[in-house]
Amino acid sequence: VNKRYPVKGLVASGDYHHVEQQLLPPEFRSHTPSYWEKRTMAPSTLLFYVGFDRTIPGLTHHNLFFDEDMEQHFNSIYIKPGWPIKPLFYVNCPSKTDPVVAPAEHENLMILIPVAPGLQDNPDIHESWFKIVLQRMEKQLGLKLSQHVLFKKAFGIQDFKKDYNSYKGNAYGLANTLRQTGGLKPSMIHKQIDNMVYAGHLTHPGPGIPPVLISGRMAADLLTNKLQMIYEQHVT
């Protein structure tokens, strides 16, 4: 049910593209659809959360499987977007340093594959790429792991769209290219609505948890200053 709430100021901390292109009326949109289409997005990711009923020697807390050609994976993200045939991937195994996150003699893994944003994905694709990374892990570690999987959950591009309204299902905002740096990022200050500011990974200072937290503080300061100016104009 749509409701109206009168406010003195608004911080839009959702996905910038979603707020602007889906929630605001056309006359209050600062950018055109073509503007967003021309942006170079950082990768999305295919994530797997996996529990094993055995320990996995050879893994540490942080693990990079860069045993295939990096250029072919890079090209599948930026040059010719598509699912990487021989993906590079990251494996996080927190149970190596924190015994609370998995039962004794078990392991808890998060596997991350960088992929191009905007790809179509589905459970069958997820299963195919899980088999690829598991076979690569088995080869590098010299272990049979497939029969020891107790729990597996995938989180992909469509999940980023559904859960976070993420533009093209991106996971990391805008790519850090020269033309998308500093003042060339989408502005935090709304051009038509005086008491509205943006925060989050598509504006300043950029993606990642620390910058997004900084962005929230910057947005709060901007809005506080703008509201103070509006107040002073009314009382003078």
Image (tube, rainbow, N blue to C red):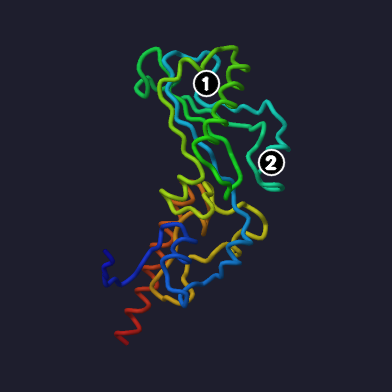
Q: Quadrant of the C terminus?
A: bottom left
Which residue is at 49% across, 72% downward? 29
Please say if 80 is above or below 50. below
Q: Position of residue 32 (x, y in %)?
A: 56, 70
Q: Position of residue 71 (x, y in %)?
A: 73, 38
Q: Position of residue 3 (x, y in %)?
A: 26, 68
Q: Earlier in the sequence, mark 2 or mark 1?
A: 1
Seen in the image, is 196 located left or right of residue 91?
left
- In-front residue for pair 218/101: 101
Contact flag, marks 2 and 1 (Cβ < 8 Å) = no
Mark sitting on residue 10? none
Which residue is denoted by mark 2 in the rendering? 74
Type of amino acid at the residue the image marks with label 2: Phe
- In-front residue for pair 210/91: 91
Cα gap from disc 2 to disc 1, whole angstroms: 25 Å
Q: How packed is label 2: few (under 14 Cα within 10 Å), some, or many (20 or more)?
A: some
Mark sitting on residue 60? 1
